Amino acid sequence: MTEQDKKSIREYLDQVRRHSGNRGPAEQQELVRALEEHIHEIINAKPGSQEPVDVKAILLEMDPPESFGTPTDQEDSERSGEFRRMSLGKLSLVVLITAVTTPFLLMAIGQLVRGTIGSIATVGIPLGIVLLVVALSLGIAARKERAGKATIIASAIILASLAVFVPVNMVFWTGGEETGESMQIIESEPAGEPAQPPTE
Amino acid sequence: MQEWTRQFRKGLLELCVLNVLGTSESYGYEIVRNLEQYDELAVSESTLYPILSRLRKDGFLKVRVGPSQSGPPRRYFSLTNLGKTYTEGLNQYWDDLTRAVNRLRRSIGKEIQK
């Protein structure tokens, strides 16, 4: 049997597999295996096996692949599932980038417009956290397998860390501004010398 | 007519396959060749293999894998004890059914003659 013959058999069996998807994986596999055996039995049964066997003619004599069932949506749904996972994965990445950049962007805008970052940080950082959670959820949804225990624990640790460190950071930012202001006051009144009342 | 024949043959072929395997074990291609000897019972692979698969799944057939000249190993089908009982039951029912239908046709034929 030539390579082309083997290829023709493979193609025929692939088409049968595609059309018999509604039978369930075990029966589908059994059917394809039985047909492969059947094709080889026909080839072996041909008189004068020394002569080249016309495999294409044998396959044409057999039932067309369509007769083994109707093509199910299995393949289509697998493809659409793949596409959905890919889209969710991309979306998750976009949201993650947005989540990371948004607080900094808002801080920069706040600094330019108002000259202060404290009030903007109070909006930007929670927004960033929310976006992080959304990105994480999308990322988990985009996975082919269901999220395992390890993934959930790791995600929970990351979120808990954010929940602890972000408020601490916010306090630092806000406290920093207040300290700056009080330092300015102290600078205007040098230490060691009591404030002199206006002499008039 | 065609649809009725198709449906009728569907159940009947199961009985025929069981009867073929009732005498000795056989493999797919051989069963096809066996049934081909009777014009009305000729069966194609798209009909036979799903029947074999279903009968095996239902516990009426068992499979033995044997060597083949070339290609994948040959799978020999034979009746299980359950399959033997099932076949006997089906054969009995088929005999009763054909007798009843023949009786009915004969009696109706007589009434028409009257």
Image (cartoon, helix red, strand yellow):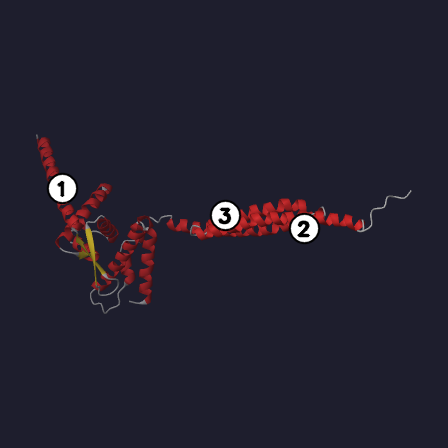
Mark in the foreground, 3 or 1: 3
- Looking at this view, name the residue that lies furthest to the right: A200
Picture residue at 11% right of the left edge, 35% below the top: B104
**Which quarter of the image is occupied by the N terminus of chain A?**
bottom left
Dot 1: element: helix
- The three-letter amino acid code for the residue at tag 3 is Ser
Dot 3: element: helix
Do the numbered discs 2 and 3 sit on residues whose CB atoms are within 8 Å? no
Image-quadrant location for residue A54 = bottom left
Task: Identify residue for label 2.
Answer: A108
Task: Identify residue for label 1.
Answer: B93
- The three-letter amino acid code for the residue at tag 1 is Tyr
Q: Is residue B114 left or right of residue B4?
A: left
Which chain contains the residue that carries disc 1? Answer: B
Spatial CA distance of label 2 from label 3 is: 28 Å
Return the residue nearer the eye: B11 or A25.
A25
* Vertical order, B67 against A27 (above or below): below
Q: Is residue A147 left or right of residue A97?
A: left
Q: Classify 10 Å Cα crowding around label 3: few (below 14), some (14-19), many (20 and above).
A: some
Q: Classify 10 Å Cα crowding around label 1: few (below 14), some (14-19), many (20 and above).
A: few
Task: Identify residue for label 3.
Answer: A137
